[in-house]
Image (spheres, grey):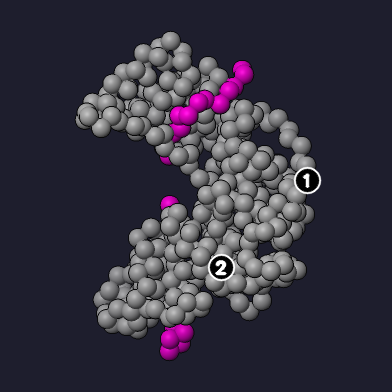
Amino acid sequence: MSLAPAGNVGSARPPVNGRAQPSFAMLSGVAPRRFFGWRSLVLATMLPATLHATLGCSGRPKPSADPSPGDASRSEDPVELLEHEPRPSAAFSSPSSEDAGDARRRKHSEHADRCHDDDLDACVALGVDYELGRGSPPDLARATETYDHACKLGAAVACLDLAQLYDRGSGVTKDAGAAAQLYSMACEANEGTACNALGVDFMDGTGVERDDIRAGALFSRACKLDEAEGCTNLGYLRAMGRGVPKDGVLAVELYARGCDEGSAQGCHNLAYRCESGRDVAQSTRRALALYDKACALGYAPSCGNLGGLFERGAGVPRDDDKAVGLYAKACTMGDAMGCSNVGHMYEVGRGVPKDMAKAKVYYRRGCDGGNETACKNLGAL
């Protein structure tokens, strides 16, 4: 089957007295997803070293250096992970002179009529309507059928959208193999998001046999297709030397490209490099700006790290009030470390009145989220 990218329609798709001190996440993220019918991709030289010579922090890149063995909180290795970003939502415009609901219902009806005539873009849009409840009640079963129909007609983005439903088990039985097949089909049709998702599958060995070389090839392809997360994830492989030669300077350049193209995690990883001076000239000021950008893009660990800079007065005047606010934002976004840090601020009364009851609440949230520091401090109260 020959697949072609659809038009402009996408789919929807975040020691005090011997106690443990608050900790700051350096590089973190979440890795989802999966495959059959692999068509080999040639792993070429990933990207030229001059890609972003003018980006990153300040000055010339520094030689690669390993983290200090005794500085576990600054270790990049255990927490520098990947994140597959969902595809952005389709934009639906409504005439200002009429009710938006009426406009969406008419648009939905139009999509249904045109899809009946096998219009690819209309079928993809109709699937989004059913998935999100735009112009009709949400109906994941019909969304699945519609995406499947559009995928078989050759709409690569519909294959991607259907893959994500199988990946999440939304409206269908969760099926990693089926998701991987669909990602592969969409990737072959140059859907960069699908190439990145399949790369994550190969890197994690989720639903497929782990293969870092194939993951690298897929991330490279995604990056060349202007998929920001592909650039960031390829940077990770370069930083770790997994499936490709280790090259911290090139990792920095790839993080910079990912950040420029909208990858919050690319900004976060680049910020860590700038803050620590790994493979690039150290610049706390640049790190602060990058953490701020990633936080604004919705990456919770960056909000927490930005809070850490304000708490320590690193690159900015010390401001405990701002630190608490940023820790709380990270916590609200689901970052367990952020919750732990809010608990610490309440325990010692920094930026907020001292309140042991609230400290326990936040330590509990952090501990429930898997943060060991929060669990230790909760147990000591």
Q: Which residue is mark 2?
A: 286
Q: Residues within 10 Å of mark 2 (few under 14, many from 20)?
A: some
Mark nearer the N terminus (1 vs 2)? 1
* Numbered label attached to residue 45: 1
Looking at this rendering, what residue extends furthest in the front direction? 97
Q: Quadrant of residue 214?
A: top right
Judge whether 113 appears above or below 83 on screen: above
Looking at this rendering, what residue extends furthest in the bottom direction? 17
Q: Locate the N terminus and report the quarter of the image it occupies.
A: top right
| Coordinates of residue 147 in the picture (x, y in percent) | 45, 24
Q: Give the amino acid type for the residue marked by disc 1 in the picture.
A: Thr
Q: From the viewer's side, name the closer residue of 320 and 161.
A: 320
| Coordinates of residue 210 in the picture (x, y in percent) | 67, 44
**Is residue 20 rendered to the left or right of residue 250?**
left
| Coordinates of residue 321 in the picture (x, y in percent) | 34, 76
Q: Name the main secondary structure of what is drawn in magenta.
A: loop
Q: Is residue 3 magenta?
A: yes
Q: Bounds of the magenta span?
A: 1-22
Q: Which residue is at a point 48% across and 39% down the rendered structure image?
A: 87
